[in-house]
Amino acid sequence: MTTLPNILVLCTGNSCRSQLLHGYLQQLLAGRASVYSAGVETHGLNPRAVRVMAEDNVDIAHHTSNHVDEYATVPFAYVLTVCDHAHEVCPVFPATAQQLHHNFPDPAKATGNEAEVMQQFRAVRDQVKSYAQQFTKKYFPG
């Protein structure tokens, strides 16, 4: 029995961007990879992130905000950083882990009324979904 490759999605607080990508990768790679997400800090799961993912039929309500140190012993095949801060302070992973980086805007920093803030969350969600699809196609074809 072969073990599935492990993927870590890393951002600053593990509340929005990493949670969005975690949700999409988990859906796209079900049965083909184990997906984890963490932060270099923990800020708790953002309720707006849960809401915009539910709008796209992806349930992340059960996710937790985890610190990267919790996964120190997991052998990751891929470490995906989704913000510049996490990329800059990313802990050292074994050389076997392929590290990829894409900086997404932080929807938690959106300003305006609730409709405008939610629009920012949806825009970032859509960028993350596109990235997840491209990653899956490139690294997990078939």
Image (spheres, helix red, strand yellow):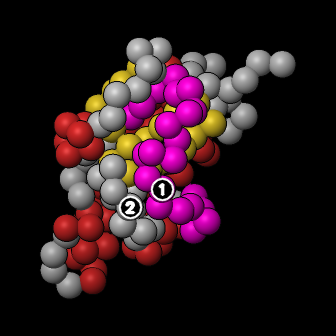
Q: Which residue is mark 1?
A: 66
Residue 40 covered by magenta stretch: no
Where disc 2 sits, the SS reads: loop
The image quadrant where one finds the N terminus is: top right
Dots 1 and 2: beta carbons under 8 Å?
yes
Which numbered disc flags the more N-terminal residue, 1 or 2?
A: 2
Q: Which residues are magenta?
A: 57-80
Instruction: Name which residue lies at 51% across and 47% down.
Output: 70
In the image, farthest residue toward the right: 1
Q: Which residue is mark 2?
A: 42
Residue 105 position, x and y percent, is: 21, 53
Q: Amino acid at mark 1?
A: Asn
Give the spatial CA distance, label 1 vs label 2: 6 Å
> From what the image shows, is residue 3 above or below residue 50?
above
> From what the image shows, is residue 109 above or below residue 128?
below
Pick the front one: 74 or 77: 74
